[in-house]
């Protein structure tokens, strides 16, 4: 399995500002993902973070709003840009397992709880 | 396209009673199916998964689930609920080989009462 940490764990931000969330995996992984969990809702995939190339965004999510970096095989960042109260959510990073037994599973970080005022 | 339906957004059981959380899926390819649990203010933890082979899979904390292709279901059960099982449970389906995009159900909040 993969152990994933995220920073910050929570933040309160003002409208119009941006926040960058960091995701660190304890081992090299091929695929990393970013999800959003709006209050009382399920998880929705924002994008797949590709190492060495641009992220692949899901319908309804755009790079200008959610720029993603993936500089190496253990680290990724998600920026929430020009925030509005509607961006208040939990943002979760996940990684596809590596090795012979867990490549069919995604492991999740603890999440970043964002509140936009 | 894939989808997951979890019947019952809230389920309440007595401690020691059977837990049954329902999940039905739709997939155009053989599915990989997962159950995750989310405790308050925490991320998601994998409970169990079905990929191929045996259709009854056992997970952590005494939970198990059975893949029934004819019913397109993957219901989660536990014979005897414990107070510590109170959490939100998410069923998810994967499109290709399990390591790629996950589509989640809307979640079921489990409450365990004395």
Image (cartoon, coloured by chain):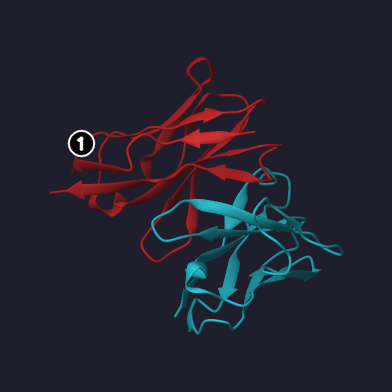
Any part of residue B54 in sight: yes
Image quarter in which the N terminus of chain B is found: top right
> Camera-side residue: B43 or A25?
B43
What residue is shown at x 66% (from left), y 40% (from top)? B98
What residue is shown at x 54% (from left), y 19% (from top)? B69
Q: Quadrant of residue B39?
A: bottom left
Residue tagged 1: B17
What residue is shown at x 56% (from left), y 63% (from top)? A92
In the rendered image, residue B64, in percent from the top left (x then y), is placed at: 42, 34
> Which tint was used for chain B?
red
In the rendered image, residue B54, in percent from the top left (x then y), is placed at: 56, 24
Tell me if A53 is positioned left or right of B69 in this view.
Answer: right
Tell me if B76 is positioned left or right of A1 in this view.
Answer: left
The residue lying furthest to the left in this view is B114
* Image height of B107 relative to A113, above or below: above
In the rendered image, residue A65, in percent from the top left (x then y), is placed at: 67, 69
């Amino acid at each position: 399995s993969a152990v994933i940490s995220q920073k910050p764990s929570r933040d309160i931000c003002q409208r119009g500002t941006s926040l960058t969330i960091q995701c660190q995996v304890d081992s090299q992984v091929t695929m990393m993902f970013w999800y959003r969990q709006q209050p009382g809702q399920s998880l929705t995939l924002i994008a797949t973070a590709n190492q060495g190339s641009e992220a692949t965004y899901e319908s309804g999510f755009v790079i200008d709003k959610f720029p993603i970096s993936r500089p190496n095989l253990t680290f990724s960042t998600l920026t929430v840009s020009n925030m509005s109260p509607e961006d208040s959510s939990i943002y979760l990073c996940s990684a596809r397992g590596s090795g012979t037994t867990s490549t069919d599973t995604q492991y999740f970080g603890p999440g970043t709880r964002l509140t936009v005022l | 396209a894939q989808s997951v339906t979890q019947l019952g957004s809230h389920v309440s059981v007595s401690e020691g009673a059977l837990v049954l959380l329902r999940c039905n899926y739709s997939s155009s390819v053989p599915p990989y199916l997962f159950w995750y649990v989310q405790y308050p203010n925490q991320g998601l933890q994998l409970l169990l998964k079905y990929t191929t082979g045996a259709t009854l899979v056992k997970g952590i904390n005494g939970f198990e689930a059975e893949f029934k292709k004819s019913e397109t279901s993957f219901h989660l059960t536990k014979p005897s609920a414990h107070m510590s099982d109170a959490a939100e449970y998410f069923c998810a389906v994967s499109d290709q080989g399990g390591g790629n995009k996950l589509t989640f159900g809307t979640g079921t909040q489990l409450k365990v009462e004395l």
